[in-house]
Image: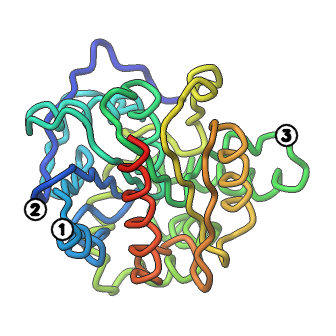
């Protein structure tokens, strides 16, 4: 069990900050920081008239580690809020992928006044699958491998199998020798510091009370547990829209960037009209 931090302090995150207009805050997932993660979406968003702020979560990319011994998803959401304030942004559209979707969701739950809309790409709220016989074996294996990583086991003992549970293609792309491997190595250093994926669960009451334009996006070829989480979240968030991107898995914004960007831009425009 990870220790709780005493009086953790939010920090300003490093970010790619481009364009002008309504802000779109982009939050990357567990391994690849903002530049590589959102490389195919930043320019289209800027060209569409948005100010893009693609953050590096603490301990990733150019962002500092901060001084917290345990970094919860909630603390990372406070990092987002602090970064918006320091960049003089009152409210932003927020999009997060995978682990970053958890952080984006927490920002929306805890600071809805800072969020114009929220887009959650392949959210990983696997705690919701506990006790479901259809997913219990998958979740047990996921948790076992995640625990090995958090305990400092060599990556050869857990990483590829763990990533393969979410997306076999992603696992191959993040193997030693791949171009992305140096980025993965720094992310591995966060194991045991960041809140575990399997431990995160949003507050049910706050979730049910959230009234914001919300879109949940899954890849049509994603593993069944990920699609199940997307469907559950769409049911539990008032008025949420659930979209599937054909021909894509967990890394859908990288695998089908043109279609993802089209869906995202349409949703942002619609959300602005609602506001």
Asked if the residue under mark 1 is in contact with the one under mark 2, i.e. CB atoms within 8 Å, the reply is yes
The quadrant in which residue 235 appears is top right
Asked if the residue under mark 3 is in contact with the one under mark 1, i.e. CB atoms within 8 Å, the reply is no
Compare marks 2 and 1 and give the one earlier in the sequence. 2
Q: Which mark is residue 131?
A: 3
Residue wearing tag 1: 46
Compare marks 1 and 3 and give the one earlier in the sequence. 1
Looking at this view, name the residue that lies furthest to the right.
133
Q: Which residue appears at 14% of the width and 43% of the height?
A: 64
Secondary structure beneath dot 3 equals loop
Relative height, residue 236 to residue 46 (above, below): above
In which quadrant will I find the N terminus? top right
Residue wearing tag 2: 19
Q: Which residue appears at 52% of the width and 47% of the height?
A: 214
Left or right, 139 with respect to 150, comes to right
Relative depth, front residue between 116 and 255: 116
Work out how far the residue at label 2 is from the one at label 1, CA to CA, in angstroms. Answer: 5 Å
Q: Which residue appears at 37% of the width and 81% of the height?
A: 176
Secondary structure beneath dot 1 equals helix
Q: Position of residue 226 (x, y in %)?
A: 66, 60
Left or right, 252 with respect to 45, comes to right
């Amino acid at each position: 069990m990870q220790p709780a931090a005493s009086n953790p302090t939010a920090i300003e995150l490093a970010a790619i900050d481009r364009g002008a207009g309504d802000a779109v805050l982009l939050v990357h997932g567990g391994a690849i920081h903002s530049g590589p993660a959102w490389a195919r979406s930043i320019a289209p968003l800027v060209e569409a008239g948005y100010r893009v702020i693609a953050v590096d979560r603490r301990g990733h990319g150019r962002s500092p580690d901060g001084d917290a011994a345990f970094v919860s998803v909630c603390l990372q959401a406070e990092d987002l809020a602090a970064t918006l304030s320091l960049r003089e942004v009152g409210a932003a559209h927020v999009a997060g992928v995978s682990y970053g979707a958890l952080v984006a969701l927490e920002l929306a739950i805890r600071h809805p006044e800072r969020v114009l809309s929220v887009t959650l790409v392949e959210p990983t709220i696997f705690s919701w699958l506990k006790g479901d016989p259809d997913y219990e074996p998958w979740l047990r294996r996921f948790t076992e491998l995640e625990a090995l990583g958090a305990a400092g086991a060599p990556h050869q003992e857990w990483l590829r199998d763990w990533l393969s549970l979410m997306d076999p293609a992603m696992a191959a792309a993040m193997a030693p020798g791949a171009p992305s491997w140096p980025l993965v190595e720094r992310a591995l250093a966060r194991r045991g510091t960041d809140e575990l994926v399997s431990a995160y669960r949003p507050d049910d009451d706050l979730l049910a009370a959230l009234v914001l334009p919300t879109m949940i996006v899954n890849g049509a070829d994603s593993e069944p547990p990920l699609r199940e989480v997307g469907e559950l979240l769409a049911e539990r968030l008032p008025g949420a829209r659930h979209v599937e991107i054909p021909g894509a898995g967990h890394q859908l914004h990288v695998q089908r960037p043109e279609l993802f960007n089209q869906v995202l831009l349409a949703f942002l425009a619609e959300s602005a009209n609602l506001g």
